[in-house]
Amino acid sequence: MTDIKTNLRRHALEKRDLVTPHEAHEAAAAIRAAGLALVEALSKGEKPVVSVYWPIRSEINTRLLIDALCDRGVAVALPVMSAVREPLVFRSFSPGDDLAKGPFGLSEPSADKPGVDPAIVFAPLAAFDRKGFRMGYGGGIYDATFASLRKRRSVTAVGLAYAVQEADAIPIEPHDQKLDYIITERETIRCC
Ligand SMILES: Nc1nc2c(c(=O)[nH]1)N(C=O)[C@@H](CNc1ccc(C(=O)N[C@@H](CCC(=O)O)C(=O)O)cc1)CN2
Ligand SMILES: Nc1ncnc2c1ncn2[C@@H]1O[C@H](COP(=O)(O)OP(=O)(O)OP(=O)(O)O)[C@@H](O)[C@H]1O
């Protein structure tokens, strides 16, 4: 199981690394539009707290989406890592805030920013399948996070990835938490 997942992860990340700067730019605009449309459809007149990751490496770029959400008055939070297999905490973010350097090249809000529980979480994907099963970098962190949040409140989990990161089927382990939606530069998938 571990070997299959490791190979799937490596293969999908290699494909992600081949995305050209032009494609990345277009994809960032596409996920801004699709992400905004989904948040608006899920909000039903309320203003939910929305968590978006701050991109690292060749991850699909969320910065246009973050700006667009902030422009519309949506409360945005960024994840802060504590340890592998431990849930993330989420801290409020406003455009222009200084971000602190975390492990693995992460940029995170500093500890003086208020902690919040998001209702919608945009999560980065290494690989995904259409049913909503996902893989990240192998820390089990988003799985732990969705499990913990879902015990406390209803939360909509939205994966963001390039279409080339799709796999036929991600092998499932007991701790895996399913996504509700996946947004790629091509489409929004409602996972059933
Ligand atoms: N942009 C972004 N922010 C994020 C995540 C993410 O995947 N992307 N996270 C997602 O959870 C959390 C941070 N967790 C992370 C966990 C591991 C690695 C990482 O680079 N791991 C190493 C492998 C380490 C090992 O095997 O010991 C690697 O991939 O090289 C990065 C982020 C929260 N913020
Ligand atoms: N809660 C857990 N209980 C038992 N094993 C776990 C748990 N979380 C992760 N693991 C183990 O750690 C390894 C990596 O997990 P997995 O592939 O699910 O991480 P991931 O989905 O890539 O990480 P993330 O959720 O941070 O994006 C797997 O071999 C898995 O068996």
Image: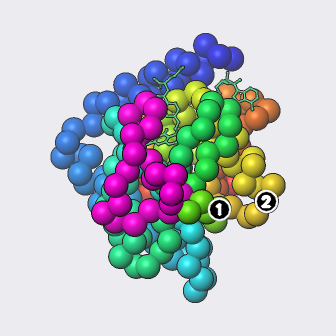
Residue 34: in sight, yes or no?
A: no
Location of the N terminus by quadrant is top right
The percent position of residue 133, horizontal first and vertical second, equals 64, 40
- CB-based contact (under 8 Å), mark 1 and mark 2: yes
Measured in 3D between alpha carbons, the distance from the residue under mark 1 to the one under mark 2, in whole angstroms, is: 9 Å
Q: Nearer the viewer, residue 37 or 73?
A: 73
Identify which residue is drawn at 28% across, 37% down: 19
Residue 108 magenta-highlighted = yes
Residue 171: in sight, yes or no?
A: yes
Residue 41 position (above or below residue 62): below
Q: Which mark is residue 117?
A: 1
Identify which residue is drawn at 62% across, 55% down: 157
The percent position of residue 107, horizontal first and vertical second, equals 40, 44
Judge left or right: residue 78 versus residue 141. left
Displayed quadrant of residue 155: bottom right
Badge 2 amino acid: Arg
Furthest residue in direction top, as rendered: 3
Dot 1 alpha-carbon crowd within 10 angstroms: few under 14, some 14 to 19, many 20 or more:
some
Residues in magenta? 91-113
Q: Nearer the viewer, residue 190 or 176?
A: 176
Instruction: Determine which residue is flagged by label 2.
Output: 152
Residue 161 position (above or below residue 122): above
Displayed quadrant of residue 94: bottom left
The percent position of residue 100, horizontal first and vertical second, equals 39, 45
Badge 1 amino acid: Asp
| Mark 1: secondary structure | loop
